[in-house]
Image (spheres, rainbow, N blue to C red):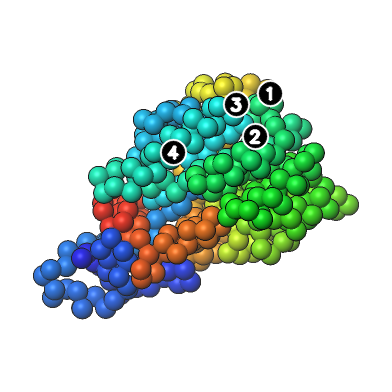
């Protein structure tokens, strides 16, 4: 048994000071520090006044450190998993994009195999919870950096074939046949259905939500905008109380002036994501995304024609950006990157908070949310 002392413990609804976090492979509880100090059988970890928070859950990340999920390379996904623990991510969904079906299936097979590996104590990276399939069932007019030649109508048979590994997928509900696909998937599976890369009207978006959509892919980006006489997908996502919305809080994809407004509206249905590409963690320069060249300068990733193409955001930096640009308490912001995404994809019984009985996925972070240590199922994976 281990105990983290001298930390500010972030719970789903507060920050607790003067207590200790007791854990093995599971969270045992938040206890009086005195109860553990005299017990020589308990290993003490000094947080030195830093935050003690639940591990972050990134449900939308394509790549990192030169690798990409859609490459279908086991070593590549492993490299990503090992890299993101330094950003406080303890569990994640490797995310595919609109490439060919054989490429998607290869990536799914790799992630299936690695998901089992990631449960082993000697695995060095973040635990793989499944896959996020961003496409190929999207609208060409809102494809963004996705490859148009691989866009297809919604395919419920394909999705059901891979429901063991796909946790969430993106679909444009207005495209022919896609609403029927949404209804079938909602009826027959537990997959989260996300609306994105879509030109749906407000009315079409609301019909899709009624049919089973419960999630919006990177709110504001690659979807019909909020206009006063054409409210669009953005308004449908914001006003539907049971719909989760992703936000790329890098201050580039979405202006920071909107962070407070969106957070106030969505509450515990707001999810911070990275949408990170293979350029994440690397220097400015030229990389690739879905077979297309992308150009990275600072926080901006673009295609040659200027189209925005993913990000280089780290999830702990998204937390930091929300801290800097809203008046929200830190526990509420951390929840956006931990419990909220865990709940959206159906893993909140074991992930997302420091509640007794859950996996001991824990991070220690300073006031700027730089990561000092990362524990997964009670095992140290990173220490600064």
Q: Which residue is mark 1?
A: 149
Residue lying furthest right: 229
Q: How would you rate the neighbour count of disc 1 (Cα within 10 Å): few for under 14, some for 14-19, many for 20 or more?
A: few
Q: Considering the numbered disc 2 on the image, is that residue within a helix, a strand or a loop?
A: strand
Determine if residue 126 is in view: no
Query: Looking at the image, do the residues carrying marks 2 and 1 touch, with CB atoms under 8 Å apart?
Result: no
Relative depth, front residue between 55 and 320:
55
- Tell me the residue that label 4 is attached to: 111
Q: CA distance from mark 1 to mark 3?
A: 9 Å
Residue 66 position within the rendered picture, expressed as x and y whole percent measured from the top left: 43, 28
Name the one closer to the observer, 198 or 252: 198
Task: Kindly indicate the quadrant of the structure image that contains residue 173.
Answer: top right
Residue 102 falls left or right of residue 87:
right
> Mark 1 or mark 4, which has the lower sequence index?
4
Q: Are marks 3 and 2 in contact (CB under 8 Å)?
A: no
Foreground of the two, 257 or 211: 211
* Residue linked to disc 2: 136
The first of marks 2 and 1 along the sequence is: 2
User: Circle 3 is placed at which residue position?
Assistant: 100
Q: Earlier in the sequence, mark 1 or mark 3?
A: 3
Between discs 3 and 2, the one toward the N terminus: 3
Check whether the beta carbons of the residues at disc 4 and disc 2 lie within 8 A of each other: no
Label 4 and label 2: CA atoms lie apart by 18 Å
Quadrant position of residue 367: bottom left
Q: Label 3: few (<14), some or many (≥20) within 10 Å?
A: some
Who's the residue at 48% across and 40% down the image? 94
Secondary structure state at the residue bearing disc 1? helix
């Amino acid at each position: 048994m281990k105990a983290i002392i001298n930390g500010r413990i972030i719970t789903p609804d507060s920050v607790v000071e003067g207590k200790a976090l007791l854990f093995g492979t599971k969270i045992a509880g938040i206890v009086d520090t005195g109860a553990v100090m005299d017990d020589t059988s308990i290993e003490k970890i000094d947080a030195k006044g830093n935050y003690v928070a639940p591990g972050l859950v990134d449900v939308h990340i394509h790549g990192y450190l030169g690798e990409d999920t859609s490459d279908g390379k086991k070593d590549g996904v492993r490299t990503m998993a090992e890299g993101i623990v330094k950003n406080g991510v303890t569990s994640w969904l490797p995310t595919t994009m609109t490439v060919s079906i054989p490429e998607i299936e290869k990536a799914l097979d790799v992630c299936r195999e690695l998901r089992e590996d990631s449960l082993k104590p000697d695995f060095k990276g973040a635990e793989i919870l499944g896959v996020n399939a961003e496409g190929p069932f999207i609208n060409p007019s809102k494809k963004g950096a996705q490859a148009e030649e691989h866009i297809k109508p919604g395919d419920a048979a394909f999705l059901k074939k891979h429901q063991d590994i796909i946790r969430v997928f993106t679909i444009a509900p207005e495209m022919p046949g896609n609403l029927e696909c949404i209804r079938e998937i909602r009826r027959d599976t537990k997959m989260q259905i996300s609306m994105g890369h879509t030109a749906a009207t407000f009315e079409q978006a609301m019909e899709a939500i009624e049919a089973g959509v419960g999630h919006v892919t990177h709110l504001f980006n690659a979807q019909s905008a909020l206009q006063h006489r054409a409210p669009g997908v953005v308004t449908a996502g914001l006003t539907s109380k049971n719909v989760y919305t992703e936000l790329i809080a890098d201050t580039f994809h979405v202006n920071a002036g909107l962070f407070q407004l969106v957070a106030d509206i969505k509450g515990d249905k707001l999810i911070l994501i990275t949408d990170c590409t293979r350029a994440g963690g690397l220097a400015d320069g030229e990389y690739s995304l879905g077979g297309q060249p992308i150009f990275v300068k600072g926080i901006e990733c673009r295609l040659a024609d200027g189209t925005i193409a993913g990000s280089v955001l780290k999830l702990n930096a998204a937390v930091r950006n929300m801290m800097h640009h809203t008046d929200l308490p830190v526990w509420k912001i951390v929840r956006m990157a931990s419990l909220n995404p865990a709940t959206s994809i159906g893993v909140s019984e074991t992930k997302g908070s420091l509640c007794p009985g859950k996996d001991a996925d824990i991070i220690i972070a300073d006031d700027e949310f730089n990561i000092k240590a990362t524990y997964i199922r009670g095992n140290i994976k990173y220490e600064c």
